[in-house]
Amino acid sequence: MCERSIAVVSHCILNQNVVVHGLERAVGAFPFVKNIPEKIGLVQLPCPEFLILGPNRPSMTYKDYLEINDYRQKCGQLLASTILELKGYQKVGIKIIGLIGIAQSPNCGITGQRGVFMTEFLRLCQDNNIKMPYIEVPIDYPEDHQFEEKVNLFLKGDH
Ligand code: SF4
């Protein structure tokens, strides 16, 4: 039987409708998604911005999010079911390949200034002994055509 595996993705990779209206970079899902091998399951994280502030929120900075009362805790609450899900996969030996975030997002950025939501997510992964390598969709995607190659390599899971 072939190895079972999953990758965790920021919500808007599969559904751009949660993005602040006018800043979407695709209609529906990001184009690279159609090249993800179908044997890899995708676990879609919740979108904290949409769920906490709603569809009509303005575009906000990292600092703006930090100033929202209990924002970090609310992110943690939103992530609880995903952590439970990932622990379930670990228990039965389904490989967790890693995480695909969104570069420079105040919530889903991972490198540079790590987003509020990803800080919480990666902390919870660490607390629960879930290894979570990562990659980010660059700010100039879909114009950055090299990203598709990079993500395909990442999803091979050899890291
Ligand atoms: S919070 Fe994350 S999932 Fe939501 S729109 Fe921003 S980058 Fe996408």
Image (spheres, grey):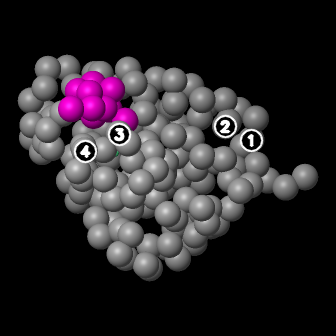
User: Closer to the N terminus: mark 1 or mark 3?
Assistant: 3
Which residue, given by chain and number where applicable, does mark 2 sit on? 90
Pointer 3: what residue?
18
Report how many numbered discs are placed on residues in the image.
4
Query: Which numbered dot is residue 21?
Result: 4
Query: Which percent across, then down, holds residue 60?
Result: 13, 42
Closer to us: mark 1 or mark 3? 3
Percent across and percent down for residue 91 are 71, 32
- Alpha carbons under labels 3 and 4: distance apart: 8 Å
Label 4 sits on what residue type?
Answer: His
**Residue depicted at 60% across the width and 61% down the height:** 34
With respect to residue 38, does 138 lie above or below? below
Label 4 and label 2: CA atoms lie apart by 37 Å
In primary-sequence order, the first of circles 4 and 2 is: 4
Mark 1 C-beta to ligand 1 under 8 Å: no
Q: Tell me if label 3 and label 4 are in contact, CB under 8 Å.
A: no
Mark closer to the chain start, 2 or 3: 3
Identify the secondary structure beneath mark 3. Answer: helix
Residue corresponding to mark 1: 93
Amino acid type shown at disc 3: Val
Which element carries disc 1, helix, strand or loop? loop
Please report the bounds of the magenta region as a residue range.
47-56
In the depicted structure, whether residue 70 falls above or below residue 38: above
Q: Given the image, on which type of amino acid does mark 1 rest? A: Gly
Separation of residues labelled 2 and 1 (CA atoms): 5 Å
Badges 2 and 1: C-beta atoms under 8 Å apart?
Answer: yes
- For disc 3, does the CB lie below 8 Å from ligand 1? yes
Say few, some or many: other residues with alpha carbon within 10 Å of mark 3 (under 14 / 14 to 19 / 20 or more).
Answer: many
User: Few, some or many C-alpha atoms within 10 Å of disc 1 (few <14, some 14-19, many ≥20)?
Assistant: few
Q: Position of residue 18 (x, y in %)?
A: 35, 39
